[in-house]
């Protein structure tokens, strides 16, 4: 080897080292797969020293699958956080310096409900105790979360239990691998490979859910295929359920109400027909043979063309109770959806679910829970709470939120949804006087129900980072945390999620959390300000306020915003549809006077004249424009916040989000221009000088929307 060659080689090595040293973060290359379970090494040396005192052993009581998962998670977490393999010792006697997983029905957990846990220091050990293995698993995740946040364990004393019993994700996944309203790739469930091949990803999905306390998953779309009731598919479902079970998660299925006819070959699916009842009983028995902890059925019936009991002149209660009867021998439930509305040009879709279900209060089998979307229409960026909440005291009502961003900009708009969930949960129904919040309806405390439910329509898919938009992971996280404890604040959850997922640097976290907390208001501002809504048919993404033709009136845009030469908005007071009458007088009072209605809800309840002066001192037209423009511009502010955090962010994540924020800005302007130009044709007013006029004409915007929608 010549000395010249050696010099060149040495030079190359130096260049390589130099580039590595200059770019210390890039080696991480965070692809988002690990979500909030990254278990990055603890860097605070005094905290690390505290933790190291408890790593001499792990001991556990109980040997079930869930306990094994808790142990595995703890060992993986500790190894990654602290670089130590911690072994299991079972006979530890009086030893200290370890972590004890104690399944203990008697002493310190006596006051805790089944799934609750306590974490405390006792005789020099960290002790996680619970009555159930699931509780131990939740406690283990809580301890690991505490350690990921590098919090002291010197005075560790945490006790927590879920406020809601059924905390579940609803997947709108189809058997062909597509996802209805899914924006993060295709379905996680690979039906054609099951049951022989069980994708390892199912386990990571289960871990992520269990880390938040989610204990149920509905695997298939509410627009269900009958094939899930076939023996072939039940076996496939059983293979997925066996993974979920290890993490305390029960598996549920959406069912096609007409399955007895289409799959079973019976002449009808009439819920009062004894043959149909027998068919379902047999089906449920078959399912329990394969899946002993099966959770139950979720049903969308007589809704948007799906079959249901009304096809036979029966009620929703008849249908639900027939299925409940099939579940009598088992610990399963029937979750019946309240998302129904009829094609009636003169009716107000807002009122439909209430009219249909309130008369049925008291008629449902105790195994039935009614699942109600948070608002009366359909997951709009902002909706008043559904008037069903509180008005069916004899029926357990669960709430359904949507994590997938159907109306919230798919996977290109950053919208942190915790404030949406909280807004519904904190709404006061006044049914038993002030303080009768939706949260108290759904956690059962208002009307004394123990079957309580919070469901979230999942935003997961086959994308490597699970949710497409990296920040959308926060919506899954927030839903899970709130389903466990609805009293957590949006801020708390955002801070926790950002700290676990993006960066531990305090300075970087601040702008990220600010961005997250403002994101929903910003979106509403350029998308549906002042209480506009837009559930028209189609892809639910492109702006189409002009859409006036549909197969039914409530599948058009004009049905909802009611723009005309006088003004804008849907009159739901006595002079209009009187939907307000479905609320208690105290709630009506907040919304029935256009002068007093809070501006975010104004156009939900009133048809307001273009020149009416609002509480801001601006006319309706001016206020709309102010919101459209300010909020579209605020996306630039979001970009700035994100950039402030850049030095502490993984470059892959930084770049991905930065690019999506650019798309968001472009699309925010698209939305703004479409609304402004279209509404201008009714308002016949100029765009005030302070605002830059749209660069395109209305016709040009319409053309771009048509291209977007083209097949
Ligand atoms: C709407 C969706 C539709 C769903 C329906 C539902 O557009 O795809 O099937 O809700 O919840 O939001 O059943």
Image (cartoon, grey):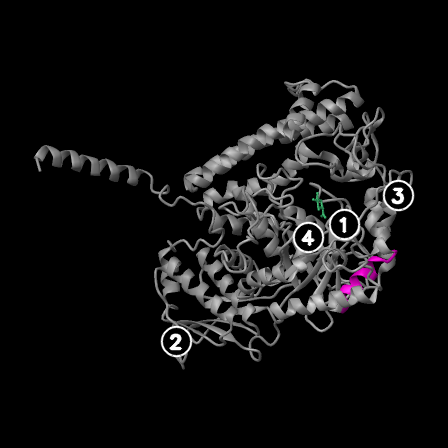
Extreme residue in the left direction: 2
Task: Choose the circle earlier in sequence order: 2 or 4.
Answer: 2
The majority secondary structure of the magenta stretch comes to helix
Q: Quadrant of the N terminus?
A: top left
Ligand 1 falls in quadrant: top right
From this viewpoint, which residue is outermost toward the right? 575
Q: Quadrant of residue 9?
A: top left
> Would you say the residues marked 3 and 2 are in contact, meaning their CB atoms lie under 8 Å apart?
no
Residue 578's disc is 3
Looking at the image, residue 402 lies above or below residue 84: above
Q: Quadrant of residue 288?
A: bottom right
Instruction: Identify the disc placed on residue 225.
Output: 4
Q: Nearer the viewer, residue 575 or 64?
A: 64
Left or right: residue 432 versus residue 703 is right
In the rendered structure, which segment of residues is drawn in magenta? 313-325
- As drawn, the label of residue 469 is none
Q: Which residue is mark 1?
A: 306
Q: Which residue: 73% across, 64% down? A: 445
Please name which of the two marks, 3 or 4, marks the residue nearer to the observer: 4
The residue depicted at 44 percent of the width and 53 percent of the height is 38
Callout in the foreground (1, 2)? 1
Query: Which residue is the site of mark 2?
Result: 89
Mark closer to the observer (1, 4): 4
| Residue found 72% across the figure and 50% down from its top | 374
What is the C-alpha distance between the residues marked 3 and 2? 67 Å
Q: CA distance from mark 1 to mark 2?
A: 55 Å
């Amino acid at each position: 080897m010549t000395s010249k060659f050696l010099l060149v080689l040495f030079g190359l090595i130096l260049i390589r080292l130099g580039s590595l040293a200059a770019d210390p973060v890039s080696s991480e290359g965070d692809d988002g797969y690990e979500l909030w379970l990254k278990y990055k090494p603890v860097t605070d040396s005094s905290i690390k020293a505290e933790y190291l005192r408890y790593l001499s052993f792990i001991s556990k009581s109980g040997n079930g699958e869930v306990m094994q998962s808790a142990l595995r998670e703890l060992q993986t977490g500790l190894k990654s956080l602290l670089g130590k393999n911690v072994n299991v010792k079972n006979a530890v006697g009086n030893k200290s310096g370890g972590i004890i997983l104690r399944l203990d029905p008697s002493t310190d957990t006596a006051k805790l409900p089944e799934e609750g846990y306590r974490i405390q220091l006792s005789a020099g050990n960290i002790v996680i105790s619970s009555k159930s293995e699931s509780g131990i698993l939740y406690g283990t995740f809580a301890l690991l979360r505490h350690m990921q946040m590098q919090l002291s364990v010197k005075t560790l004393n945490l006790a927590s239990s879920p406020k809601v019993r059924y905390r579940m994700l609803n997947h709108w996944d189809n058997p062909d691998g597509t996802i209805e309203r899914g924006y993060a790739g295709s379905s996680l469930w690979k039906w054609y490979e099951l049951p022989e091949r069980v994708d390892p990803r199912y386990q990571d999905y289960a871990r992520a859910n269990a880390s938040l306390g989610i204990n149920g998953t509905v695997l298939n779309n509410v627009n269900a295929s009958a094939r899930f009731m076939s023996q072939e598919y039940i076996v496939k479902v059983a293979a997925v359920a066996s993974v979920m079970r290890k993490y305390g998660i029960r598996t549920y299925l959406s069912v096609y109400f007409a399955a007895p006819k289409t799959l079973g070959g019976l002449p009808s699916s009439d819920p009062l027909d004894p043959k149909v009842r027998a068919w379902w009983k047999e089906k449920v028995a078959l399912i329990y043979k394969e899946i002993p902890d099966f959770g139950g059925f979720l049903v969308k019936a007589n809704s948007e063309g799906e079959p249901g009991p009304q096809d036979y002149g029966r009620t929703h209660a008849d249908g639900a109770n027939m299925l409940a009867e099939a579940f009598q021998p088992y610990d399963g439930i029937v979750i019946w959806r309240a998302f129904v509305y009829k094609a009636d040009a003169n009716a107000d879709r807002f009122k439909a679910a209430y009219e249909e279900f309130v008369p049925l209060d008291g008629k449902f089998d105790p195994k039935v829970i009614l699942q109600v979307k948070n608002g009366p229409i359909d997951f709009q960026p902002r909706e008043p709470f559904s008037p069903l909440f509180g008005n069916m005291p004899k029926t357990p009502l669960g709430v359904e939120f949507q994590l997938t961003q159907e109306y919230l900009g798919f996977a290109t708009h950053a919208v942190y949804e915790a404030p949406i969930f909280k807004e519904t949960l904190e709404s006061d129904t006044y049914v038993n006087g002030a303080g009768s919040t939706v949260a108290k309806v759904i956690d059962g405390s208002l009307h004394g129900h123990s079957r309580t439910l919070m469901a979230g329509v999942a935003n997961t898919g086959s994308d490597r980072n699970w949710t497409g938009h990296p920040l959308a992971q926060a919506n899954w996280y927030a839903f899970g945390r709130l389903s466990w404890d609805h009293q957590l604040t949006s801020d708390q959850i955002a801070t926790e999620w950002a700290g676990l997922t993006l960066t531990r640097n305090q300075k970087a976290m601040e702008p990220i959390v600010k961005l997250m907390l403002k994101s929903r208001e910003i979106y509403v501002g350029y998308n549906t300000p002042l209480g506009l809504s837009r559930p028209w048919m189609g892809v639910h993404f492109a702006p189409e306020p002009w859409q006036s033709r549909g197969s039914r009136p409530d599948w058009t845009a004009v049905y909802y915003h009611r723009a005309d030469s006088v003004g804008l908005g849907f009159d739901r007071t006595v002079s209009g549809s009187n939907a307000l009458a479905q609320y208690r007088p105290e709630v009506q009072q907040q919304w029935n006077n256009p002068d007093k209605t809070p501006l975010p809800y104004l156009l939900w309840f009133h048809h307001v004249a273009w020149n009416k002066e609002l509480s801001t001192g601006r006319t309706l037209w001016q206020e709309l424009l102010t919101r459209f423009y300010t909020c579209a511009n605020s996306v630039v502010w979001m970009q700035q916040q994100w950039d402030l955090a850049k030095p502490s962010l993984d470059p892959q994540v930084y770049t991905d989000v930065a690019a999506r924020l650019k798309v968001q800005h472009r699309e925010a302007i698209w939305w703004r221009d479409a609304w402004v130009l279209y509404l201008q044709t009714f308002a016949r007013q100029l765009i005030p000088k302070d605002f830059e006029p749209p660069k395109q004409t209305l016709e040009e915007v319409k053309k771009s929307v048509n291209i977007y929608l083209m097949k």
